[in-house]
């Protein structure tokens, strides 16, 4: 997706050979026009997949997930990282390690929002080692629902997340595939 790659080139900041900071438009400040284009593209890519729900993890996946849900006309569920007084009943949970934050969190979704008849699209901001996607897949399977696909805004292709998801037979669609961050320069596949 050219608009996304251009935005990464212009406003992304390479912090190391492993970390790309995109807080100017994706995960701190959000560019609504770009999110609309991202939602349009995911909706186009998964138009024939029979999606009934979209699942993401708070907070960075919410904007692209909502825009995709708007285009597909389906609800968006976000897995919460923090306990809530209103989210207590027999939760669907999974543990996820954040490469960027170097922390492990338990994420949770109420079972009221997912059922065995759902065909779920996972949307996330980044794919690195695949831990967030694997946690969401676990939750979706706990509900007896089907993972219809995984939409990733930015994939760090030099890390192993895609290979793991591919080996498990999941359809993965990434809008920007980063080949390398070496020398402070973003190069794309």
Image: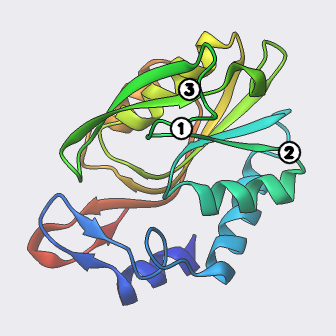
The one of 50 and 113 positioned closer to us in this rendering: 113
Q: Quadrant of residue 164?
A: top left
Frontmost residue, 82 versus 71: 82
User: How many labels, in total?
Assistant: 3
The image shows residue 38, relative to residue 121, as above or below, that is: below
Residue at screen point 69% across, 19% down: 111
Label 3, label 1: how far apart the Cα atoms are: 31 Å
Q: Residue at 58% x, 19% y: name it.
A: 91
Q: Which mark is residue 74?
A: 2
Badge 1 vs badge 2, beta-carbon distance below 8 Å? no
Marks 2 and 3, how far apart in space?
A: 21 Å
Q: Nearer the viewer, mark 1 or mark 2?
A: 1
Q: Position of residue 127 (x, y in %)?
A: 40, 47
**Does dot 3 land on a helix, a strand or a loop?**
loop
Quick one: label 3 or label 1, which is nearer the N terminus?
Answer: 1
Quadrant location of the C terminus?
Answer: bottom left
Residue 55 in view of the camera: yes
Labelled pair 2, 3 in contact (Cβ < 8 Å): no
Q: Please state if 99 lies on the left or on the right of 151 as rendered.
A: left
For residue 84, the mark is 1
In space, the residues marked 1 and 2 are separated at their CA atoms by 24 Å
Q: How far from the left and from the top, in percent, is residue 177?
A: 41, 58
Q: Earlier in the sequence, mark 1 or mark 2?
A: 2
Q: Residue at x 57, y 35 (%)?
A: 85
Q: Position of residue 65 (x, y in %)?
A: 66, 54
Point out residue 37 in the picture as x, y percentages from the top left corner: 70, 73
User: Label for residue 170?
Assistant: 3
User: Quick one: label 2 or label 3, which is nearer the N terminus?
Assistant: 2
Residue depicted at 18% across the width and 45% down the height: 102
In the rendered image, the quadrant that contains the N terminus is bottom right
Q: Residues within 10 Å of mark 3 (few under 14, many from 20)?
A: some
């Amino acid at each position: 997706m050219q608009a996304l790659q251009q935005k990464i080139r212009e406003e992304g900041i390479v912090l190391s050979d492993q970390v790309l900071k995109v807080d100017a438009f994706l995960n701190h400040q959000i560019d609504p026009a770009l999110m609309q284009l991202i939602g349009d593209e995911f909706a186009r890519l998964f138009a024939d997949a029979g999606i009934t729900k979209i699942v993401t993890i708070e907070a960075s996946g919410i904007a692209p997930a909502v825009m995709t849900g708007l285009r597909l006309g389906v609800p968006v569920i976000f897995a919460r990282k923090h306990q809530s007084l209103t989210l207590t009943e027999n939760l669907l949970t999974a543990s996820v390690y954040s490469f960027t934050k170097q922390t492990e969190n338990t994420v949770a979704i109420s079972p009221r929002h997912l059922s065995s008849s759902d065909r779920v699209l996972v949307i996330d901001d980044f794919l690195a080692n695949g831990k967030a996607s694997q946690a969401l897949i676990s939750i979706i399977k706990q509900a007896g629902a089907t993972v219809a696909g995984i939409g990733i805004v930015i994939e760090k292709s030099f890390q192993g997340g895609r290979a793991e998801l591919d080996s498990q037979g999941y359809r993965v669609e990434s809008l920007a595939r980063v080949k390398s961050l070496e020398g402070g320069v973003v190069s794309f596949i």
